[in-house]
Image: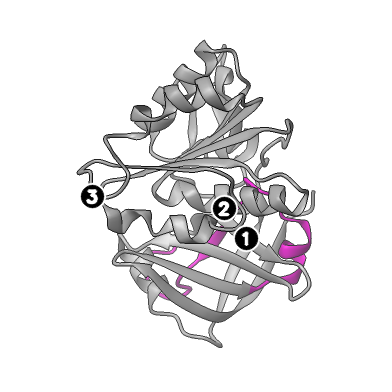
């Protein structure tokens, strides 16, 4: 798949919650090729630090308009700069990068937390367009973290909700609901993206019941092309580059979270 370096025009940003924003960019070449699970590397500043690009998972595309949708948390200098860009501004984007999800199975379950729910949203939208409405299990610290449920309405089947403080859904992590959903749901595939401890726990439980499981790893990626090795981690019998070999892996391929 071809990788493009494009000067993408910002056509809008919107606030999703106190620390999360969505940015829409005109990038026709990337929008035409991107598949769920892939990401882009965004250069937020050409003149001042930070100069390194930031990887952001693709949360959706509008192929007709040539638009890609990215969602990110405002947590550091780079994302603070990105949060200040306005419609009409132009930013440099490389993509689509990495390998996406293998959309096998007819009865999928998507499990996510935090911004890991962004690439899963692209996956859910793609599945829905193919006539499959995946069940979704999402977790957050508080009700405010689960604004995602509104984004999944209409494209998902059953939506399970958990919060650490019990302010929405079941109190606890996604592991509070996962065993029951696995037992009752009859899933033939599970897709996971979110914080590493959550992915480790979820993938372990899924593999125990013998259901195929794919995980999308989150790592700091300086280049996004497999050259700098900053995102490497231990796989089965070898080191793996998350940006180039992944970010999506079969759960049994990963030994370091």
Up the image or down, 16 lies above or below 236; here it is below
Comparing 57 with 97, the one in front is 57
Is residue 35 among the parts visible in the rendering? no
- Dots 2, 3 in contact, CB < 8 A: no
Mark 2 vs mark 3, CA separation in Å: 23 Å
- Mark 3 highlights which residue? 167
Residue 48 among those drawn in magenta: yes
Q: Give the number of the disc on residue 121.
A: 2
In terms of sequence position, does the residue under pointer 2 or pointer 3 come before the other? 2
Q: Residue at x 66, y 48 (%)?
A: 36
Residue located farthest toward the left when viewing the structure as drawn: 165
Up the image or down, 21 lies above or below 122; here it is below
State how many labels appear: 3
Q: Give the number of the disc on residue 60.
A: 1
What is the quadrant of the C terminus in the image?
Answer: top left
Is 9 displayed left or right of 83 in the figure? right
Up the image or down, 176 lies above or below 7; here it is above
Mark 1 vs mark 2, CA separation in Å: 7 Å
Comparing 123 with 154, the one in front is 154
Badge 3 local density, few (<14 within 10 Å), some, or many (20+)? some
Residue 16 among those drawn in magenta: no
Up the image or down, 210 lies above or below 213; here it is above
| Residue bounds of the magenta highlight | 26-52
- Check disc 3 and report its element: helix, strand or loop: loop
Is residue 212 among the parts visible in the rendering? yes
Mark 3 vs mark 1, CA separation in Å: 28 Å
Residue 144 x %, y %: 29, 59
Residue 132 in which image quadrant = top right
Is 250 displayed left or right of 16 in the figure? right
Q: Which residue is drawn at 39% across and 23% down?
A: 201
């Amino acid at each position: 798949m071809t990788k493009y370096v494009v000067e993408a025009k910002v056509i809008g940003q919107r606030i999703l919650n106190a620390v999360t924003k969505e940015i829409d960019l005109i990038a026709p070449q990337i929008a035409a090729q991107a598949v769920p699970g892939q990401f882009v590397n965004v250069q937020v500043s050409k003149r001042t630090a930070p100069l390194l690009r930031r990887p952001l998972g693709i949360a959706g595309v509008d192929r007709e308009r040539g638009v890609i949708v990215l969602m990110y948390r405002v947590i550091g200098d780079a994302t603070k700069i990105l949060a200040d860009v306005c419609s009409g501004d132009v930013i440099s984007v490389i993509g689509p990068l990495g390998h996406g999800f293998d959309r096998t199975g007819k009865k999928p379950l998507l499990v996510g937390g935090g911004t890991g729910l962004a690439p899963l949203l692209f996956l859910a939208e793609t599945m829905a367009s193919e006539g499959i409405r995946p069940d979704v299990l999402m977790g957050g610290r508080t009700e405010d973290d689960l604004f995602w449920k509104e984004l999944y309405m209409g494209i998902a089947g059953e939506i399970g909700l958990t919060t650490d403080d019990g302010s929405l859904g079941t109190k606890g992590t996604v592991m509070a609901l996962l065993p029951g959903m696995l037992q009752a749901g009859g899933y033939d595939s599970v897709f996971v993206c979110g914080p590493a401890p959550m992915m480790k726990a979820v993938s372990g439980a899924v593999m125990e019941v013998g259901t195929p499981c794919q995980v999308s790893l989150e790592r700091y990626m300086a280049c996004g092309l497999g050259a700098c090795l900053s995102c490497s981690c231990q796989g089965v019998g070898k080191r793996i580059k998350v940006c180039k070999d992944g970010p999506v892996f079969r759960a049994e391929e990963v030994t370091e979270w």
